[in-house]
Image (spheres, grey):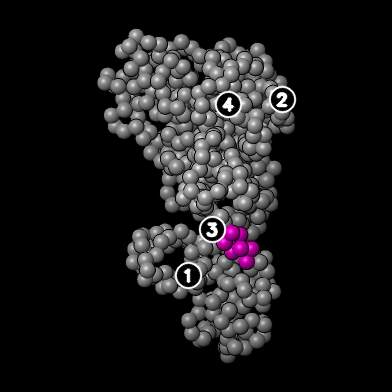
Amino acid sequence: MPALAEADGTVGSDTAQNIATTSATPDTQPPPAATNPSPVPVTDSTLNGPDAAPASGLIRASYAAPDTVDATDARSLDTGDLWQRIRNGFALKQLDSPLVATHVDWYAQRPDYLRRTIARSKLYLFHIMEEVQKRGMPAEIALLPIVESAFNPMAYSRSHASGIWQFIPSTGKDFGLKQNSWYDGRRDIVAATDAALDYLDKLHTMFGTWNLALAAYNCGEGCVSRAIAKNQAQGLPTNYLSLSLPAETRHYVPKLMAVKEIISDPGMVGLSLDSIPNQAYFVSVSLHQSIDVKLAAKLADMPVKEFKSLNPAFTKPVVRSDSAQPILLPVDRAEAFSDNLKNYDRPLVSWQLYPAKKGERAVAIAKKFGVTVAWLKQHNEFKLTRKGRLAANYSLMLPLGNKVDTALAAAPTKSPAAVRHTTRTVKVKRGDTLAALARHHGVSIAEIKRWNRLRGEHLRAGSQLIVAEADSVAHHNETTHKVSAHHAKARHYTVKHGDSLSGIAKKFDVSVEDIQHWNSIKHHTVIKPGTRLVLN
């Protein structure tokens, strides 16, 4: 991974019995055409520092022997199963390391973890495989996100690596992945895949073999360059297994080879792989207007969770049209989305970004936007001083004024009366009063004032006034409040005396493997009291 972030399930031991690599088929992907490039300057885009390159500052790719084998072009085979297409494209040679067996055994002991990973991969694998083969890369590269992130698009490491390809911010920017308060390109399935494969291609050209390219992807170009220079100075071999590399990097390629063995022969670990159609799962749809994430999912007639899984790069509840980033939708949902969007005649956006300044009072901000401080905390992350002022500058998500959907999000959900109403607006007539309108529509004066951001009780004839709220949104707000409160409590946990990972996992309804992955805890590591765990 281009981030020095620890992959989930890292095995700390270097000792394990060796097993033979199982190959599902002798037909594998042909390696890219051999090249003998001119020296390439070595730049370390990881956390190794500016002095990471060897003294010469240059590396030649011609020193290394090929680590691929001849294979049949998987695209030329008539197969309707994506797994078989991937197997047909395998091209990396067997790695003579006992660590491969170690990692096969690690996955074999975690069938549920492996099943969840495979289930997540089904949304992305076809696209990744298409891009891998366009570049003439071995099909094993398409499986790398299993090692990097378990195909979790929201994966985030303690080294600040993010997305299925685990880019740290600086390397992401080096490869064109934009990152701002609305959008994180490291989580963009299409953009991050392009960036990761571009980076791997560059590393392969630089170091000459895929094993060394993968090692550099994990620990950095400078890290591998120094290891090569050290062996060259001592007259030692410079292939992957001969280099002195960080423990995680020594396990990195064996882990990928273990995944390859399992995909080649899933029965070896008691796994049954359901067929994945060898066809696109999603398509890109351009937006010309900003739109709420939940509304976009509704117009596409798909669960919000699945929409977010395809579009994890959008970090706010709004997809901004000026980001120039398309959204991804399942192939069979794109047409419905376009049709529903054309026929939707209500506001598409109910949120706005407020650049709050250090020292502003949270109470004043909440009052300005017609929400409570509790609502502000529920929808944003910020710190307050003892006097209730912002401890720093923050970009806060707040309701957009005069939007029906926004009023619903801002309103408290404790009042049963508020949940009963259907959304309705009226045109104010001469002589109308808040008291009369409230009585007529069965609501309170306070509710009408809150929905319409009214400070006084004066009404202007001809203006539109919200006099009732929607069942679905009010109910949704109540549910969201409960769920958000639950996650706020469960997000972190401080380890106590007598705690075990299995006990904590059971308490928070997650797996031990997930806790290990979220917190970069190595296998068999003993957790100490006082340790603060992330429980996403």
Specify start and end residues of the magenta stretch as a single range: 478-486
- Decide: is 464 above or below 158: below
- In space, the residues marked 4 and 3 are separated at their CA atoms by 34 Å
The circle on residue 267 is: 2
Find numbered disc 3 in the image and state the secondary structure of the residue it sits on: helix
Residue tagged 4: 103
The kind of secondary structure the magenta stretch mainly shows is helix
Residue 128, image x and y in percent? Answer: 57, 31
CA–CA distance in space, label 4 to label 2: 16 Å
Residue occupying image coordinates x 52% and y 32%: 10
- Cα separation, mark 1 vs mark 3, equals 16 Å
Image x and y of residue 505, in percent:
60, 47
What residue sits right under mark 3 in the picture? 488
Amino acid bearing label 3: Ala
Task: Give the residue at x 57% y 24%.
Answer: 102
Residue 365 pos. (x, y %): 42, 70
Secondary structure under badge 4?
Answer: helix
* Label 3 neighbour load within 10 Å: few <14, some 14-19, many 20+: few
Q: CA distance from mark 3 to mark 2?
A: 40 Å
Q: Left of 24 or right of it: where is 496?
A: left
Q: Earlier in the sequence, mark 4 or mark 3?
A: 4
Q: Which residue is mark 1?
A: 373
Q: From this viewpoint, is residue 77 visible?
A: yes
Dot placed on the residue nearer the N-terminal end, 1 or 3? 1
Tell which circle, 4 or 1, labels the residue nearer the N-terminal end. Answer: 4
